[in-house]
Image (tube, rainbow, N blue to C red):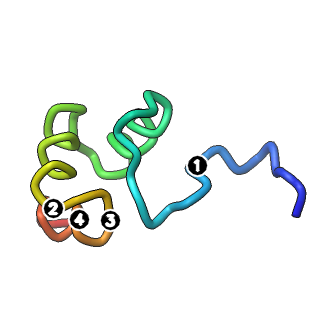
Amino acid sequence: MSDSLKDRGPQDRTRINVQEDWEVAYWTRELGVDKARLQQAVQAVGPAVSAVKKYLGI
């Protein structure tokens, strides 16, 4: 599979990696929350996007 330069999201869109600044920037935009709230959610429920969305009420 070749890399698409038009696809600027995370490689695994089912998990959030708060250790990567560019992923934090992507997910804060995508979920409409700030960095602190995103980190709080990931710490509370883990990195699964579905769990984070449920925690945030999205």
Q: Residue furthest right?
A: 2
Residue identifier under label 1: 9
Residue identifier under label 3: 48
Q: Using the rendered view, name the quadrant where residue 55 is placed.
A: bottom left
Label pair 2/3, CB-CB below 8 angstroms: yes
Q: Vertically, is 23 above or below 2?
A: above
- Tell me how far mark 3 sits from mark 4, CA to CA: 9 Å
The crowding category of the residue bearing disc 3, from other C-alpha atoms within 10 Å (few below 14, some 14 to 19, many at least 20), is some
Along the line of sight, which residue is nearer the eye, 28 or 12? 12
- Quick one: SS at disc 2? helix
Residue appearing at x 10%, y 55% in the figure: 44
User: What amino acid does circle 1 point to?
Assistant: Gly
- The circle drawn on residue 50 is none
Q: Vertically, is 52 above or below 32?
A: below
- Tell me how far mark 4 sits from mark 2, CA to CA: 10 Å
- Quick one: SS at disc 4? helix
- The circle drawn on residue 45 is 2
- Tell me how far mark 2 sits from mark 1, CA to CA: 22 Å
Q: Using the rendered view, name the quadrant where residue 37 is placed.
A: top left
Q: Earlier in the sequence, mark 1 or mark 4?
A: 1
Label pair 1/4, CB-CB below 8 angstroms: no
